[in-house]
Image (cartoon, rainbow, N blue to C red):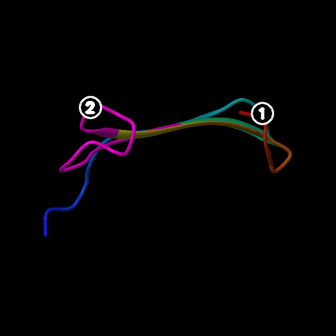
Amino acid sequence: MVRSVPIFDYRLPLSDTAFIEMVVWQVPEPVAASGHPFKYRLAVVSNGVCAL
């Protein structure tokens, strides 16, 4: 079984209670409804609540 490969993992603190996180993986086959071999996450978290 081929697994996903981490490509990029970055967290940028904005303050003591907020940060931005960006993560990208290369997957063996495109994720449903996608034509590219990447899975990704972008989050903006403030006071423990994901705002994006």
State which quarter of the image contains the C terminus: top right
As drawn, is 7 to the left or to the right of 23? left
- Vertical order, 27 against 37 (above or below): below
Front-most of 2 and 35? 35
Inspect the image, locate mark 2, and give the three-letter code of the amino acid beneath it: His
Q: Main secondary structure of the magenta part?
A: loop
Residue drawn at (26%, 31%) of the image: 36
Residue drawn at (24%, 48%) of the image: 27
Q: Quadrant of residue 39?
A: top left
Range drawn in magenta: 22-38
Residue 37 magenta-highlighted: yes
Front-most of 28 and 51? 28
Which residue is most to the bottom?
1
- Vertical order, 28 against 2 (above or below): above
Residue 20 magenta-highlighted: no
Give residue 36's mark. Answer: 2
Tag 1, which secondary structure?
loop
Inspect the image, locate mark 1, and give the three-letter code of the amino acid beneath it: Ser
Tell me which label, 2 or 1, sits earlier in the chain.
1
Residue drawn at (27%, 42%) of the image: 30
Q: Mark 1 — residue?
A: 15
Give residue 45's mark. Answer: none
Q: Residues within 10 Å of mark 1 (few under 14, many from 20)?
A: few
